[in-house]
Image (spheres, rainbow, N blue to C red):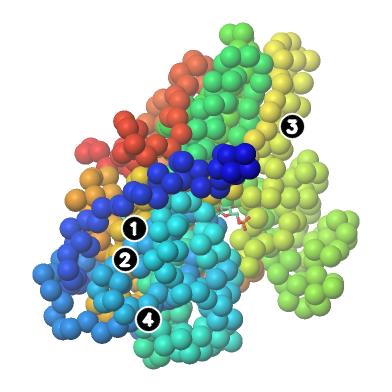
Amino acid sequence: MTEVWRDLLSSESPFLRERREYRPPLCPALAAPAAALRPLPGLRLEVLKAAREQLPYVSNTPVVEILPREAPVEAPRPRRLGVVLSGGPAPGGHNVIAGLFDAATRAHPENRVLGFVGGPKGIMVGRYVEITREMVDRHFNTGGFHMLGTGRDKIDTPERLAQCRHTCVDLHLDGLVVVGGDDSNTNAAFLAEHLREAGVQVIGIPKTIDGDLKVPGLVEVPFGFHSACLAFATEVGNLNADCTSDRKYWHFNRLMGRSASHIVLEVALQTHPNVVLIGEEIEERELTIHNVVRLIADVVVERSRQGKDYGTVLIPEGILEFIHEINVLIIKISYIIATYNRQATAEESFHKLSFEDQVQLIDNSDIWRDYDSRVFLGFPSLLQRGLLLPRDSHGNFPFAQVNTERILQEMVATYLRKQRAKGIYRGTFRTQNHYYGYDGRGTFPSKFDCDYGYNLGAAAFALLSQGATGCMAGIRQLHRPVAEWQPVGIPLAALMHLEERAGRLELVIAKQRVDLESRAFQVLAEERPRWALKDDYRFPGPIQFYGAAADSKPLTLLLNSLEA
Ligand code: FBP
């Protein structure tokens, strides 16, 4: 009897078991017995002066394509490689490790791969495990980053760089693969520069569900984006089905993606909600928060006239940064907090102060104007408190912790009350708030992300085996079948720009925002007015591994790759 229920409740679900059996194909350049690197003809990326100064060696790296070779030029020697998962989890990360491990062990049976535990901190303190075949098989095609864990530590001081160097030298590493987003790949660039003399090569891998780590023409989308979007689209599709059934709720959905609205754009194309807010467009049109409230409320009023007191709204989690009046406050408050904390003890730090004392401290700052106070005090208290939350170790504002969907929903409700008093609105505004983010980061990878992650891992090995360092692995032609994918190495230094972080200008990899000229956005702009009023909901369904939907790819990727 016990055995029966144990079997029923086994963490080895049938779905998981079946998934593990899948072995992603490699593109021809990576399936070949050996690789060669060649500068990509006609492509030279500009490197900023500050990057040339701070990263003199890795600034000279060209964009390279990885080509197949029948056999290695010289007999391969055994290598010791490290790998670290860094930043927020993204589905497909385990397959990057699998791709690296398989490529390494295929090239030489004595090659070893060491996985640093808990993110970049693992490198600093030398916490690692040796990756084994059994570990790889157990995590193949699964979501999350739990194989090694992850973290957001910044490797930004001479001491931290020295700690990493000490660990890598101590472990006799020849190479290190950093799987991460813009900040983690910034770490990778500085590590590459710093570890060069120690003979340790460093390769980055483009990961982030946010979709904002891209290099036009070279990396159209990072891995993890597709799976997370499909997970969110499944939820939004379900809500569309629910709201059109009981016809009584407006669903306010905040979707992850702190610095760009790629996720909202993709999920909107997948599900056709009634209101879609794109941060980049709001910024371009210089909308205030009250304008944004009006955008939503106008659709609510119009639908209500048609007897539809229900609908779905998609809000990018980073929307506040795109609203000029709020972004100014975010930047100023980040600066004031960082300056204050640099002088304060841990016990006196900004976030140990009461809300009233925090506001007072901000008010006393030289950079804070009366106008800033008026704007700040005019916001709902939920938003005021949100703006004061602690920034992360990279100086990023914690958008994930601010209930923007509730703030907007409450402001819309207030506005509608006034419209009702004027007799303009007669409907019923009942709401439900949702936040989708962490669930998508932990979802199973789509087949696309399984294949993509696996090929990226193999590309990292090809780059390392050919002596490359300070570059990020990428795959071109992702919209085509795997057999036509083209792996490349992209110099990290060329992706950098200067950005204000924690009150200072820092050299970091630039996040790529939604291009309002892109075909994907143009399609959205054309379709959105129809989605606002008609119930033209689309139900993409859950991530599939077999059957008709298994070979899906991001719609933004497919639309943007269409010939003009
Ligand atoms: P990465 O840039 O590391 O991929 O993470 C991005 C993200 O998923 C954002 O969308 C979100 O705002 C943030 O992580 C949440 O961070 P945390 O895990 O620190 O709560």
Q: Nearer the viewer, residue 310 or 115?
A: 115
Q: Earlier in the sequence, mark 1 or mark 3?
A: 3
Name the kind of residue labelled 2 in the image: Asp
Name the kind of residue labelled 1 in the image: Tyr
Residue at the spot 11% in from the left edge and 70% down from the top edge: 70
Name of the residue lying farthest toward the front: 1
In this view, 406 is above or below 426: below
Name the kind of residue labelled 4 in the image: Arg
Q: Quadrant of ligand 1?
A: bottom right
Query: Which numbered mark, 2 or 3, is in the foreground of this view?
Result: 2
Which residue is label 1 attached to?
454
Measured Cα–Cα span from mark 1 to mark 3 = 44 Å
Could you tell me if the residues under marks 3 and 4 are in contact, i.e. CB atoms within 8 Å? no
Which residue is label 4 attached to?
80
Q: Which mark is residue 102?
A: 2
Residue at the spot 36% in from the left edge and 45% down from the top edge: 447
Query: Would residue 210 be seen by someone viewing this image from the given angle?
Result: no
In this view, 180 is above or below 322: below
Could you tell me if the residues under marks 2 and 1 are in contact, i.e. CB atoms within 8 Å? yes
Q: Position of residue 195 (x, y in %)?
A: 42, 85
Residue at the spot 85% in from the left edge and 56% down from the top edge: 355
Kind of element beneath mark 1: helix
Q: Earlier in the sequence, mark 3 or mark 4?
A: 4
Q: Earlier in the sequence, mark 2 or mark 1?
A: 2
Measured Cα–Cα span from mark 4 to mark 1 = 19 Å
Measured Cα–Cα span from mark 2 to mark 4 = 14 Å
Residue at the spot 63% in from the left edge and 43% down from the top edge: 2
